[in-house]
Image: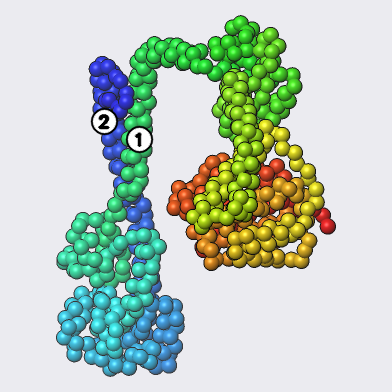
């Protein structure tokens, strides 16, 4: 019996099929025996419950019938001579002894002369039995046989249906005196029968069998129960031959289904486990060679990558190292394993504690490595905890000496070029200013226009040089910061006056609280950041719109917001907003120009001052903000 992804031989498959057939035969045999056992148990339970119901019904019905027989014996002993008051007391006593008696009537010479209780039964009083064509033949036959009979259910003259137990009375001289009849309340009997059957969870039917042995149609329950040959019990009812049929309850299908499912599940599980065992043996033989090949391939990859790779345990002892690691650090192959990984770092580095506390994903650090000969070099270290209950850590080590050298050359080149460009740009800008002020003589309108364009481009180039120099200082760590208490309002107000005058724009200042707004920052660099944000807001918003500067005190910071009514930053460009030389590729950016360094420099300066800078999209514009540490007042 093949299973998906299992490789089995023909002999193994045949063994599984034969074993499966034997197990199926065994399961079906167990199910058949269990079905017979459950059926017998169910029949026994029904028989016991039906017998309880039969006994209770016989008891409830026979009590009023025995009382009637006692009354008939008493009347026969009295020769049918009773006083009305005595008879009334006697009948009242008998009715109280059985809750199912509706009334008791005495009919000397077949006419009901006495009835108790009279209330509700007035129409039956003075009733003459021969005047009842539907009932008289049975009554006449009963008198002829000198036996009491329980008849019913019968439609009563006074209304309703009931059972009637009639007892013919014969005197000592063997002469017929009359009949004593007891009307048994059928509704109470039916209610008792229904509730008891429901308690016992039975579906029953009752019928009468004639004196000739012919069964009648059931007067309680579904007559079909008799015709379906279910359990039938004979009842000992005085003056009647009754039968009770009990519908056989079905075998609990859920129990058999659960047993079937559990047995077949066990069989399938057994076959599955056996097939897995057989397949595993075969796969192990095939996997052994594949595992050896895979280990050799992984070892080849591990040893031929350019980066050094080591694994260490919880004590920091090197467990494995690849060939590149020996090459980078100048050790011989057996020399590293067993040493502390701190041997690979310069003694000036103190990052081991940080690595020990790092538990999340890979982390990258730049530090100083140390070769076997003691020579330090630039090292890039990647740290990754291995998913083996944090027992081991993985380090990837890369020699970045060449890259750092290239970066220093680039920074030196940028610094040199920027310094060399600043002097001629200053001279060009000064000469253009003199020419535009007519110092060299009067100029035509066309000449002024061309000189103005030249001066704007010269200023833009001069700003680019300044930005490049600032970035070079920030990257190399040469930019000095003087952190002191600065009133942010004192920094912002001159900028508002200067830019609103030079660009003829409306700039409003909103302050939610009274000044001062004291922060810890470098005043010069703070002014540079505010100027960049305000210039951008003016540059990228309509000339007729208003730019708003909003100041707000936070619990530990002071918030400055620059809000414009422009089109905003494109959503796709937001992640690159504070990167160097990044500019959104849209018509507004191309028209306004720019170096793409202003926001990047502002971010670096703000973070150097322990602050935070960010952007927020507004429904009708943009909001650039900075948060700086607040100074205590």
Q: Which of these two is toward me, 180 or 539?
A: 539
Q: Residue at x 34, y 77 (%)?
A: 187
Bin the neighbour count of mark 1 within 10 Å (Cα to Cα): few under 14, some 14-19, many 20 and up.
few
Give the total number of marks visible in the rendering. Answer: 2
Label 2 packing within 10 angstroms: few (<14), some (14-19), many (20+): few
Residue 83 at x, y percent in the picture: 40, 92
Mark nearer the viewer, 1 or 2: 1
Find the residue positioned furthest to the right: 633
- Quarter of the view holding residue 111: bottom left
Whether residue 442 sits left or right of residue 520 in the image: it is left
Residue drawn at x 51%, y 53% is: 447
Check disc 2 and report its element: helix, strand or loop: helix
Instruction: Give percent across and percent down for residue 18.
Output: 25, 23
The one nearer the camera, 123 or 492, is: 492
Q: In this rendering, is residue 335 above or below 222?
A: above
- Which quarter of the figure is the N terminus placed in? top left
Instruction: Name the residue: 30% across, 79% down.
Output: 162
| Label whose residue precedes the other's in the sequence (1 or 2) | 2
Colour scheme of the rendered structure? rainbow
Mark carried by residue 339: none
At 75% from the left and 22% from the top, the residue drawn is 348
Along the line of sight, the residue nearer the viewer: 196 or 123: 196
The answer to whether residue 183 is above or below residue 395 is: below
Residue 493: quadrant of the picture: bottom right
Question: x, y (%) of residue 160?
Answer: 29, 84
In the rendered view, would you say 269 is above or below 248?
above
Mark 1 in CB contact with mark 2 (< 8 angstroms)? no
Local secondary structure at mark 1 = helix
Q: Where 344 sits versus 433, above or below?
A: above
Label 1 sits on residue: 265
Q: Which residue is mark 2?
A: 25
């Amino acid at each position: 019996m093949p299973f998906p992804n299992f490789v089995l031989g023909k002999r193994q498959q045949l063994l599984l099929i034969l074993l499966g057939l034997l197990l199926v035969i065994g399961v079906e045999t167990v199910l058949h025996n269990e079905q017979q056992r459950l059926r017998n148990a169910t029949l026994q339970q029904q028989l016991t419950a039906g017998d309880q119901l039969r006994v209770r019904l016989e008891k409830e019905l026979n009590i009023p019938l025995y009382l009637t027989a006692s009354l008939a014996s008493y009347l026969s002993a009295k020769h049918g001579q009773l006083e009305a008051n005595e008879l009334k007391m006697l009948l009242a006593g008998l009715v109280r002894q059985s809750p199912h008696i509706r009334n008791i009537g005495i009919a000397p010479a077949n006419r009901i002369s006495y009835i108790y209780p009279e209330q509700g039964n007035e129409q039956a009083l003075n009733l003459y039995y021969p005047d009842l064509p539907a009932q008289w033949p049975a009554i006449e036959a009963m008198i002829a046989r000198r036996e009491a009979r329980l008849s019913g259910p019968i439609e009563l003259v006074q209304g309703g249906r009931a059972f009637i137990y009639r007892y013919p009375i014969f005197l000592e001289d063997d002469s017929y005196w009359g009949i004593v009849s007891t009307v048994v309340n059928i509704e109470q009997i039916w209610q008792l029968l229904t509730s008891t059957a429901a308690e016992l969870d039975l579906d029953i039917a009752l019928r009468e069998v004639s004196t000739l042995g012919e069964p009648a149609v059931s007067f309680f329950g579904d007559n079909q129960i008799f015709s379906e040959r279910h359990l039938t019990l004979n009842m000992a009812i005085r003056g009647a031959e009754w039968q009770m049929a009990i519908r056989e309850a079905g075998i609990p299908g859920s129990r058999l289904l659960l047993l079937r499912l559990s047995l077949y599940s066990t069989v399938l599980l057994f076959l599955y486990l056996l097939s897995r065992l057989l397949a595993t043996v075969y796969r192990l033989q095939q996997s052994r060679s594949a595992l050896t090949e895979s280990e050799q391939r992984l070892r080849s990859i591990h040893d031929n990558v350019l980066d050094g790779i080591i694994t260490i345990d919880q004590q920091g002892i090197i467990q494995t190292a690849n060939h590149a690691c020996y090459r980078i650090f100048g050790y011989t192959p057996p020399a590293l394993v067993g040493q502390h990984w701190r041997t690979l770092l310069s003694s000036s580095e103190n990052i081991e504690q940080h690595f020990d506390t790092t538990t999340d994903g890979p982390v990258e650090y730049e530090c100083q490595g140390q070769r076997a000969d003691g020579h330090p070099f630039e090292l890039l270290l990647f740290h990754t905890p291995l998913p083996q209950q944090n027992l081991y850590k993985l380090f990837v080590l890369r020699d970045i000496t060449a890259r750092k050298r290239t970066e220093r050359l680039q920074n030196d080149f940028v610094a040199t070029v920027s310094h060399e460009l600043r002097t001629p740009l200053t001279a060009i800008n000064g000469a253009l200013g003199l020419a535009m002020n007519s110092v060299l003589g009067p100029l035509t309108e066309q000449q002024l226009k061309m000189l103005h364009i030249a001066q704007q481009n010269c200023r833009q180039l001069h700003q680019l040089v300044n930005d490049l120099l600032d970035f070079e200082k920030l990257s190399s760590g040469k930019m000095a910061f003087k952190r002191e208490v600065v009133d942010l309002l004192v920094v912002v107000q001159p900028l508002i006056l200067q830019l609103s005058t030079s660009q003829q724009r409306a700039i409003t200042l909103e302050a939610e609280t009274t000044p001062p707004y004291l922060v810890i920052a470098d005043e010069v660099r703070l002014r540079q950041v505010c100027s960049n944000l305000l210039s951008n807001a003016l540059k990228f918003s309509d000339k007729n719109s208003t730019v708003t500067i909003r100041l707000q005190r936070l619990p530990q910071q002071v918030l400055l917001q620059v809000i414009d009514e422009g089109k905003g930053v494109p959503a796709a460009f937001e992640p690159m907003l504070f990167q160097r030389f990044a500019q959104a590729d849209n018509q507004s950016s191309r028209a306004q120009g720019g170096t793409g360094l202003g926001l990047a420099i502002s971010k670096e300066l703000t973070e150097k001052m322990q602050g935070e800078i960010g952007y927020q999209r507004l429904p009708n514009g943009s909001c650039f903000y900075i948060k700086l540490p607040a100074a205590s007042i």
